[in-house]
Image (cartoon, rainbow, N blue to C red):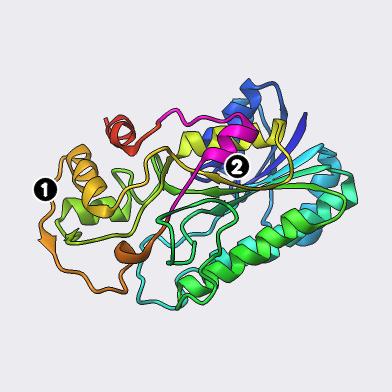
Amino acid sequence: MRVFLAGATGVIGSPLVPQLIKAGHEVTAMTRSVLRARQLEALGAYPVVCDVFDADVVRAAIADASPDAIIHQLTSLPPRLDWSNPHLFDHHNRVRTEGARILVDAALATGATRVVAQSIAFVYAPAGDLVKDEDAALFTDAPPPLGGTVAAVVELEQLVTGTAGVEGLVLRYGMLYGPGTYHDRLGSTAADIIAARVPLAAGATGMYSWLHVADAASAAVAALERGSPGIYNVVDDEPAPQPEWLPVLAQALGADPPVAAEIPPESPDMWLRGASNAKAKRELGWRPRYASWREGFAASLA
C-alpha cells in the first residue's frame, strides 16, 4: 500500500516508519527537517520536507505521492508539562485541528481512501467507571489547559470519522513512554522523578493507561491494514493509579523511591480514567508487545 505519513520523525513516527516498511508498504514520510529527511531516506522511505500548515505545499506533496492512505502522527508538544499554563497545548491543538483538516482535505482531493489519526485516551469524563470504552463521554467541560485539548480532540475525531469519502480510524493512545517521551531518561517528567519532585499521590483514585511508543506504532500499522472506521483505545492491559506505577518507573530510572504526599482533589491523579483496549484487540487484531507498564518501563529504560 502507498502510505503518506505526516509526523514521520516524532515519537511515534520514528518507530512507525521501519514498521511500515517491514510490512511491505511504500512510505512517503513528511518531516520539517532536512537532516531527518536524509535519515528517513536511509530507512527506505521517500522523504518530503514541509510544514503541515503550508497547506498548498502539503497538498502538492500528497498529490505527488498519490497515496492509498494517510497517517496523521503530527504533534507539537511543549518540552515540559506546566499545568498552570492555560495555553500549554495551544500549538499542539492547532496541529490536531487545522493540521488534520489539511490532511483530510488532501485525502479527498487525491483519492486516498483511508485516514488513520492519533488521538488520546486520557480525556474521558471523570465520572462512573474507572476504565472506559470508546463510547464513554469525554471531559468536554474540563478547565484549561485540558479543556482546549478535549475540544481539539472532539474536532479531530469528528473530522476523521465523519468525513464522507474516507475511511477514518482514530487511535486514542494512552500515556506514552519510551524513546523521546516525557518518561524517557532524557524527558522532563523523568528528570522530575529523578530529582524527587514528583510525590507519591496518597489516596489517588485516578487511573492511568500506558502505552509504549513501539506499540503505538504497531497499532497504526494494524489500523492501516484492517478494521472498520471508528475510534479505538490503544493502551496496554493494566490501567493503574499513580501510587502503583510511579515507584516502578522511579526504580527503572534508578531514582529513590518517591515520598507520599497529600494531593488536592482536583489533581489528575484523583480523577483520570483508564481505557479498555478490548475493541482494538478484537477488531484490529492488535496486541501490545508490552502488556503492562510493569515490564515495559524496565525494558525501555534498560
| 74 lies left or right of 102 | left
From the top left corner, tell me how far across and down residue 229 is, in percent.
Answer: 74, 45
Can you identify the residue that label 1 sits on? 257
Q: Can you say whether 277 is above or below 258 in the image?
A: above
Q: Residues within 10 Å of mark 2 (few under 14, many from 20)?
A: many
Q: Is residue 73 visible?
A: yes
Q: Amino acid at mark 1?
A: Pro
Q: Can you say whether 241 is above or below 125 in the image?
A: above
Q: Is residue 221 visible?
A: no
| 16 lies left or right of 128 | right
Residue depicted at x 33% and y 44%: 184
Q: Can you say whether 50 is above or below 37 in the image?
A: below
Q: To which quarter of the image does residue 196 belong? A: bottom left
Can you identify the residue that label 2 sits on? 8
Is disc 2 placed on a helix, strand or loop? loop
From the top left corner, tell me how far across and down residue 6 is, in percent.
Answer: 66, 47
| 192 lies left or right of 94 | left
Q: Can you say whether 14 is above or below 206 in the image?
A: above
From the top left corner, tell me how far across and down residue 159 is, in percent.
Answer: 74, 60
Residue stretch in magenta: 274-290
Residue depicted at x 44% and y 63%: 128
| 161 lies left or right of 300 | right
Q: Earlier in the sequence, mark 1 or mark 2?
A: 2
